[in-house]
Each structure stands twice: as C-alpha cells, then as structure tokens.
Image (tube, rainbow, N blue to C red):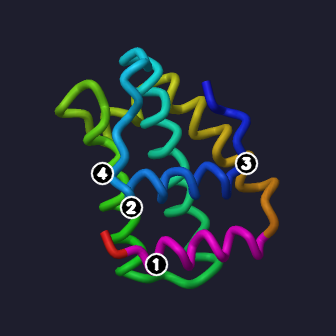
Amino acid sequence: MILALSFRRLLGLGFAAVLTQSVIAEDLTAAEANTIVKEDVAAAQVMTEMCPALIGKNAKLDANIQALIQTYLQDYSESNMTLAKLQADAEYQSVLAEAREAAKDTAKEEQKVVCQEALELAL
C-alpha cells in the first residue's frame, strides 16, 4: 500500500492522474488498484473537511472535489461503487484516518495551496 505518502504529494498525484487521464497500471491486482482509489478518495474527502476553514466555503470548490471523487471512483473495480458505499468499508476508514493524520502533519500554508489548486481545477 502507498500509505506513507505526504498529504500534499498524495493530492498532487491524484490531481496529476485526473488531469492526464492516466490509467491504472495493468500489473496491479484489482485489490491494489482499489486501495489506490480509496487513498485518492480519502484525500479528497479530507479536503472537503479542511478547505472551508482555510479558504472559505465555496460552491465551486465543493463541486470540484465531488467531481474529483467521482473521477476516482470510475477506476474502482466495482462499477457501481459510491462514496456512501466506501464509507462502510473498513479499509477505507483506515485510509481516511491516515489521510486525516497526514493533513494534520502538513503545514497550513501547504494545505491552503492544495485547496487553492482544487478550487482552480477545470475537470
């Protein structure tokens, strides 16, 4: 698993994947690919929790993050996976807790930059 990534690096990798429309590598198992999706979705969920406090509540930011989450979920092995279903997944809850901890360990200025980048996304 790729759980040791810094919060900003994790989000940066997520944004790069979305913006370049990269495909998950063929040599990953479905479980490994699903874990990567869970990590990306967890990072986006943490942004929904922390960004309003950093840059203010913003409808465009909310829409961008939700679109980002939907883009990530398209790569999940189950075609009907939703954020609500992920919330009930024990692995997702663990990944989400780690993403929250990584965010706490990230400087506020870096968090703000990530939030600004999410606000400026053109999905």
Q: Nearer the viewer, mark 2 or mark 3?
A: 2
What kind of residue is marked 2?
Leu
Numbered circles on residues, count: 4
Tell me the residue that label 2 is attached to. Answer: 19
**Cα separation between marks 2 and 4:** 10 Å
Left or right of residue 15, residue 114 in this image:
right
Tell me the residue that label 1 is attached to. Answer: 119
Q: Are marks 1 and 3 in contact (CB under 8 Å)?
A: no
User: Which SS class for mark 3?
Assistant: loop
| Percent of width and height locating residue 80 | 18, 33
> Magenta: predominant secondary structure element?
helix
User: Which mark identifies residue 6?
Assistant: 3
**Cα separation between marks 4 and 3:** 21 Å
User: Which SS class for mark 4?
Assistant: helix
Quarter in which the C terminus is drawn: bottom left
Q: Residue at x 73, y 46 (%)?
A: 101
User: Which SS class for mark 2?
Assistant: helix
**Cα separation between marks 2 and 3:** 20 Å
